[in-house]
Image (cartoon, rainbow, N blue to C red):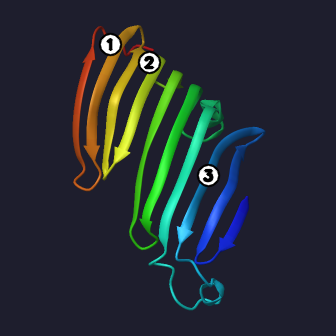
């Protein structure tokens, strides 16, 4: 990571996160109002009023790494592209972003296979929106869109499917 402390701000100029040898994410941004960090580093004061302006990008991440996690998944595939933006203050952060999955597939124990998965998600002002989901569950097509309000936990989902076969 390349960090630069300027007059009143802390800049993240080049941050990279990796999964094995694959580049998983990059980040750039600014923490405004950071100023003198020494009191905070000594445990005095609070960074709550510091302003945030950080962008993180995930480009063409192979989702196969999820197979190594203990999630009951036998096989996972696909490519993830995403961007997240963190704004506001340290005490009151706001997150927004987008995510796209292409060429996805999922095999879970005791469930029909999910193939030809593609989806587009957005997060804005505490609403997660599924703009589009297309997949084949077993051999049946599935299409869905909807939203989930994070603060009220209200789900609004429309789906269309035919011939769902759960014998896999």
> Residue 99: x percent and y percent?
46, 36
Residue at the image point whose x is 70% and y is 68% from the top: 4
The N terminus, quarter of image = bottom right
Distance, label 3 to label 1, CA atoms, is: 41 Å
Q: Are marks 2 and 3 in contact (CB under 8 Å)?
A: no
Using residue 39 as the reference point, say whether residue 83 is left or right of it: left
Q: Are marks 1 and 2 in contact (CB under 8 Å)?
A: yes
Report if residue 24 is visible in the image: yes
Residue at the image point whose x is 50% and y is 28% from the top: 101
SS class, disc 3: strand
> What residue is pinned by disc 2?
112
Vertical placement of residue 101 versus 114, above or below: below
Q: Residues within 10 Å of mark 3 (few under 14, many from 20)?
A: some
Residue at the front extreme, as displayed:
7
Q: Residues within 10 Å of mark 2 (few under 14, many from 20)?
A: some
Of mark 2 and mark 3, the one earlier in the sequence is 3
Q: Residues within 10 Å of mark 1 (few under 14, many from 20)?
A: some
> What residue is pinned by disc 3?
27
SS class, disc 2: loop
> Residue 126: x percent and y percent?
31, 52
Quadrant of the rendered image containing residue 38: bottom right
Of mark 1 and mark 2, the one earlier in the sequence is 2
User: For this rendering, which residue is in front, 113 or 103?
Assistant: 103
> What residue is pinned by disc 1?
164
Using residue 148 as the reference point, say whether residue 135 is left or right of it: right
The C terminus, quarter of image = top left
Distance, label 2 to label 3, CA atoms, is: 37 Å
Residue at the image point whose x is 41% and y is 30% from the top: 120
SS class, disc 1: loop
Vertical placement of residue 40 versus 1, above or below: below
């Amino acid at each position: 990571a390349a960090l630069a402390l300027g007059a009143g701000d802390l800049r993240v100029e080049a941050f990279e996160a990796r999964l094995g040898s694959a580049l998983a994410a990059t980040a750039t941004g600014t923490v405004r109002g950071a100023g003198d960090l020494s009191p905070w580093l000594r445990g005095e004061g609070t960074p709550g009023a510091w302003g945030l302006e950080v962008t993180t990008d995930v480009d063409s991440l192979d989702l196969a790494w999820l197979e190594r996690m203990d999630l009951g998944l036998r096989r996972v595939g696909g490519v993830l592209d995403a961007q997240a933006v963190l704004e506001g203050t340290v005490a009151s952060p706001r997150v927004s972003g987008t995510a796209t999955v292409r060429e996805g597939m999922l095999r879970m124990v005791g469930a029909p296979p999910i193939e030809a998965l593609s989806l587009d998600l957005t997060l804005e002002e505490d609403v997660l929106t599924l703009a589009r989901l297309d997949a084949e569950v077993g051999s049946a097509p599935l299409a869905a869109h909807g939203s989930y309000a994070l603060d009220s936990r209200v789900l609004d989902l429309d789906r269309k499917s035919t011939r769902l076969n759960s014998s896999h």
